[in-house]
Image: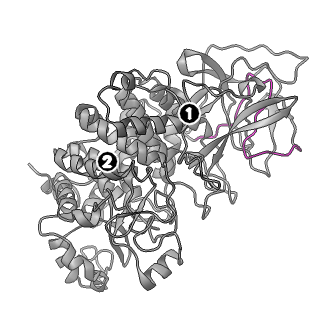
């Protein structure tokens, strides 16, 4: 690079991991990414810039975010003081106002830059955004007379939870309890938690907040390759972010967005699922709003590819499933889900299918598209064949031989029959089944994990027959999985010595509470979507009816305790936003099943024609083509 780089304010004390540069209109950020063609990706436009030699920075032309980055405490803050900024792009500002932004050509320097926001003015709350209506709320207004009181309350609470940045809505806080004196990170915007809020706004005709959220979170994505401890890897999306107001002196303020990549989280675990949810939401935004301009932009295409690089990277693993550590998904504490948890596999499968729809097909993305198809095919076979449990499969495991050494072994993972838990024998119904929670050598986690099974159904990771069996199991075991409040995050709970060993004696994950068998209203919208896909509308209506009786009365709690979900969780936050949004989204999907149908996938027969399980060499049999086809319900 020929750009002149100067060190700026490298000794200043950072208020957080994100800084802003004042009086800057164009600040580059270092963008490292290896494309399938091994080319450097840059952003192009016809924008031109002028530079005032008397000013250290450019004057920032608008109060909206351009590109913002993460700065580690050990890294230096730099700024570009040359008018030769390389290749530039124009980022669409919400509500149609353009913002100039630039990306500097790739180099190996891991330092990043941030930009200044809001013209140093103290942010003013917009009455139309916080505590009122987000601009464009025509749908909510037209439905007002038809809404029930609980719907009106839920919409009011959801709007109260909206977070603004420089006057524009960018997300919703995780929880908005005015009496909570110790919110921890519940006052932040979580990528995972915002998804049902985003769908509620989209189904209600209010897409701008979702567009803003997608734009801002893309700029927070980690863009450097790093092997440093405690640093986010390239392509990682933050688990959450917080908008902070920073005083500048002279009664002036500026707003910054401060992301958390897990460095502040309990357990310090990086979020594997954030990037997957982001891709799923990007597709949903285009499908429901009809606005495909975001996913077609070069920076969004790059963001998708960076996430896929993490998902498709080679590693020390023989399986097509993604290897992750404990606490890296919705169950974000130690609960024995390390390895290859079903939730991550189902979300990965859904994100890969989303990416295949959204990626621009060209010479440079051809290899990536091939890798996506290969992984989809291999992953679908792996999950369908090895994770599935019904009465017949349980009996097969009961009769497994162990210590088999051959390519034709039946017990490929050396599972000992003694692993079958006593509760499973009498619990599993005659005509139902489900996908187990985890699979590793000599280990099967037979717990029923609701989110993973629902997303396997929604994304068609499971076969059509398996999809039907999953809903049959939920219906047959309604009192266990649904009870008084939909739905159990997992069943059954870990108890006694097993709880102590697996959770580390976690006092919050006591049996039948929180992640350990607690009931989460946030799962309601995904259950509703699964029921709509399978034509079981009455099941979804029954679950929504149960939630309607209790959620408002109990002040919209985060989760419920006890085996039947009767009591509000002992440490549950109230006015939990994704519980509120999940209820609203479920109601609207039942009213508009045609819109809900845009959010799920049917069986992809093309994947079944391309077995890539790497079992064709050395006389091994092709494994997935015939087996997977045989399971399709005609």
Colour scheme: one colour
| Disc on res. 356 | none
On the rendered image, what quadrant is the N terminus found in? top right
How many labels were placed on the picture? 2
Please give the residue where the numbered disc 2 appears in the rendered image: 548
Q: Earlier in the sequence, mark 2 or mark 1?
A: 1
Residue 294 picture location, percent across and down: 48, 27
Q: Is residue 418 magenta?
A: no
Report the residue at 28% width, 41% height from top. 600
Residue 39 picture location, percent across and down: 57, 35
Residue 269 picture location, percent across and down: 58, 60
Res 398 → quadrant = bottom left
Please give the residue where the numbered disc 1 appears in the rendered image: 170
Report the residue at 45% width, 23% height from top. 293
- Residue range in magenta is 11-33
Report the residue at 78% width, 26% height from top. 120
Can you name the residue that lies furthest to the left here?
A: 634
Secondary structure under the numbered disc 1 in the rendered image: strand
Question: Considering depth in this image, is 25 or 259 the residue closer to the camera?
Answer: 259
Separation of residues labelled 2 and 1 (CA atoms): 28 Å
Classify 10 Å Cα crowding around label 2: few (below 14), some (14-19), many (20 and above): some
Report the residue at 65% width, 24% height from top. 64
Question: Considering depth in this image, is 338 or 477 the residue closer to the camera?
Answer: 477
Residue 78 picture location, percent across and down: 81, 36
**Residues at circles 2 and 1 in contact by the CB criterion of under 8 Å:** no
Q: Is residue 623 left or right of residue 249?
A: left
In the rendered image, the vertical position of residue 476 relative to residue 256, given as above or below: below
Q: Is residue 610 visible?
A: no
In the rendered image, the vertical position of residue 156 relative to residue 506, given as above or below: above
Main secondary-structure element of the magenta-colored stretch: loop
Q: Is residue 27 magenta?
A: yes
């Amino acid at each position: 690079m020929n750009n002149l780089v100067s060190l700026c304010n490298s000794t200043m004390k950072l208020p957080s991991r994100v800084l802003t540069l004042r009086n800057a209109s164009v600040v580059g950020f270092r963008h490292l990414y290896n494309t399938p063609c091994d080319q450097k990706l840059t952003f192009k436009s016809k924008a031109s810039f002028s530079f005032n030699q008397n000013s250290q920075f450019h004057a920032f032309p608008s109060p909206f975010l351009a590109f913002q980055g993460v700065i580690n405490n050990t890294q230096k803050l730099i700024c570009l003081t040359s008018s030769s900024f390389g290749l530039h792009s124009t980022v669409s500002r919400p509500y149609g106002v353009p913002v100039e932004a630039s990306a500097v050509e790739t180099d190996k320097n891991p330092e990043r830059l941030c930009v200044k926001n809001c013209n140093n003015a103290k942010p003013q709350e917009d009455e139309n955004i916080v505590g009122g209506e987000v601009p464009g709320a025509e749908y909510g207004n037209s439905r007002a007379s038809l809404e029930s009181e609980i719907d009106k309350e839920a919409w009011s609470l959801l709007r109260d939870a909206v977070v603004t940045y420089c006057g524009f809505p960018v997300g919703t806080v995780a929880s908005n309890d005015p009496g909570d004196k110790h919110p921890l990170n519940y006052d932040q915007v979580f990528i995972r938690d915002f998804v049902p809020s985003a769908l509620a706004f989209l189904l209600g005709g209010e897409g701008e907040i979702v567009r803003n959220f997608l734009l801002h979170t893309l700029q927070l994505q980690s863009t450097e390759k790093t092997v440093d401890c405690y640093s986010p890897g390239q392509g990682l999306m933050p688990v959450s972010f917080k908008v902070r107001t920073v005083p500048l002196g002279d009664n002036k303020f500026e707003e910054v967005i401060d992301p958390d990549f897990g460095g502040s989280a309990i357990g310090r675990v990086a979020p594997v699922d954030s990037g997957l949810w982001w891709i799923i939401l990007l597709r949903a935004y285009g499908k429901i709003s009809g606005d495909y301009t975001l996913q077609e932009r070069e920076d969004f295409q790059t963001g998708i590819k960076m996430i896929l690089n993490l998902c498709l990277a080679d590693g020390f693993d023989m399986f097509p499933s993604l290897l992750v550590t404990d606490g890296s998904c919705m169950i974000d504490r130690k609960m024995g889900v390390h390895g290859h948890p079903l939730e991550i596999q189902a979300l990965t499968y859904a994100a890969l299918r989303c990416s295949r729809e959204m990626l621009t097909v060209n010479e440079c993305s051809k290899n990536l598209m091939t890798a996506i198809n290969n992984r989809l095919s291999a992953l679908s076979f792996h999950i369908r064949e090895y994770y599935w449990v019904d009465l017949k499969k349980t009996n097969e495991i009961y009769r497994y031989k162990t210590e088999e050494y051959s390519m034709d072994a039946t017990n490929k993972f050396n599972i000992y029959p003694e692993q079958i838990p006593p509760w499973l024998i009498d619990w599993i119904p005659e005509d139902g089944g489900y996908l187990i929670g985890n699979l590793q050598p000599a280990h099967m986690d037979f717990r029923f994990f609701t989110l993973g099974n629902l997303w396997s159904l929604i994304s068609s990771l499971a076969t059509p027959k398996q999809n039907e069996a999953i809903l049959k199991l939920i219906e047959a075991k309604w009192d266990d999985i649904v009870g008084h409040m939909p739905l159990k995050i997992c069943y059954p709970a870990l108890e006694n010595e097993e709880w102590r060993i697996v959770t580390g004696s976690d006092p919050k994950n006591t049996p039948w509470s929180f992640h350990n068998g607690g009931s989460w209203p946030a799962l309601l919208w995904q259950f509703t979507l699964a029921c709509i896909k399978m034509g079981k509308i009455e099941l979804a209506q029954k679950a929504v009816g149960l939630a309607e009786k209790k959620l408002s009365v109990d002040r919209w709690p985060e989760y419920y305790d006890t085996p039947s979900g009767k009591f509000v969780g002992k440490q549950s936050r109230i006015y939990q936003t994704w519980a509120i949004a999940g209820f609203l989204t479920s109601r609207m999907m039942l009213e508009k099943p045609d819109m809900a149908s845009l959010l799920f996938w049917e069986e992809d027969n093309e994947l079944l024609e391309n077995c890539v399980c790497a079992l064709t060499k050395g006389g091994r049999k092709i494994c997935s083509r015939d087996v997977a086809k045989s399971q399709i319900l005609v």
